[in-house]
């Protein structure tokens, strides 16, 4: 049963899932877009929305929480210096998921996660 389960399991163990989502969140922060499957994009989107909300606060506790997820000083710094102030007046919906065509190698559906 998946009662009150916010993040899909994505056919991974919890440690691997956290690492994959944190890596994709870090890539989105540093490079501005991530191409992945739609289910991974939606799971990453939820994590990134939470990180940007922390960045909007801007206090030290929020920086430490974000660093504990991202494990990257560059990504945390960019999140709090550029993205947090950029979305200060927005109440949510900082990212969008755009459907792409099937992947050439195995035909898996692809999606692009970008900033709004």
Image: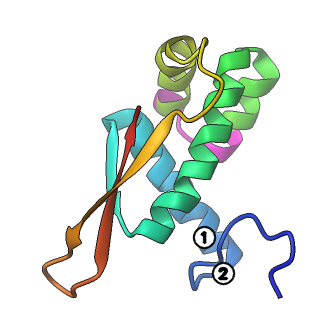
Q: What stretch is highlighted in magenta?
A: 68-74
Q: Which residue is drawn at 47% across and 22% down?
A: 78
Q: How far apart are marks 1 and 2 (CA)?
A: 6 Å
Q: Which mark is residue 13?
A: 2
Q: Is residue 111 left or right of residue 5?
A: left
Pinpoint residue 90: horizontal percent, then vertical percent.
59, 19
Quadrant position of the C terminus in the picture = top left
Badge 2 marks a residue whose secondary structure is loop
* Residue 58 picture quarter: top right
From this viewpoint, which residue is outermost toward the right?
A: 3
Quadrant position of the N terminus in the picture = bottom right
Q: Which residue is drawn at 32% across and 44% down?
A: 33
Magenta stretch holds residue 115: no
Q: How crowded is mark 1: few (under 14 residues within 10 Å), some or many (20 or more)?
A: some
Q: In this view, does 64 lie to the left or right of 102?
A: right
Q: Residue 59 carries which label?
A: none
Pinpoint residue 27: horizontal percent, then vertical percent.
39, 45
* Residue 112 picture quarter: bottom left
Instruction: Tell me if label 1 and label 2 are in contact, CB under 8 Å.
Output: yes
Residue closer to the observer: 2 or 34:
2
Q: Residue at x 53, y 25 (%)?
A: 79
* Residue 15 picture quarter: bottom right
Pinpoint residue 97: horizontal percent, then vertical percent.
41, 52
Q: Is residue 97 above or below residue 58?
A: below
Badge 1 marks a residue whose secondary structure is helix
Pinpoint residue 55: horizontal percent, then vertical percent.
65, 23
Q: Main secondary structure of the magenta part?
A: helix
Image color mode: rainbow
Q: How crowded is mark 2: few (under 14 residues within 10 Å), some or many (20 or more)?
A: few
Q: In this view, does 44 lie above or below 26?
A: below
Q: Residue 17 carries which label?
A: 1
Q: Which residue is drawn at 41% across and 42% down?
A: 28
């Amino acid at each position: 049963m998946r009662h009150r389960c916010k993040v899909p399991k994505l056919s991974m163990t919890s440690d691997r899932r956290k690492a994959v989502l944190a890596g994709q969140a870090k890539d989105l922060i540093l490079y501005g877009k991530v191409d992945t499957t739609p289910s991974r994009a939606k799971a990453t989107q939820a994590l990134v929305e939470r990180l940007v909300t922390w960045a909007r606060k801007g206090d030290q506790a929020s920086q430490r929480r974000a660093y504990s997820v991202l494990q990257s000083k560059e990504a945390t710094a960019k999140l709090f210096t550029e993205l947090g102030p950029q979305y200060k007046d927005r109440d949510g919906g900082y990212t969008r998921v755009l459907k792409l065509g099937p992947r050439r190698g195995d035909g898996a559906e692809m999606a692009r996660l970008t900033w709004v």
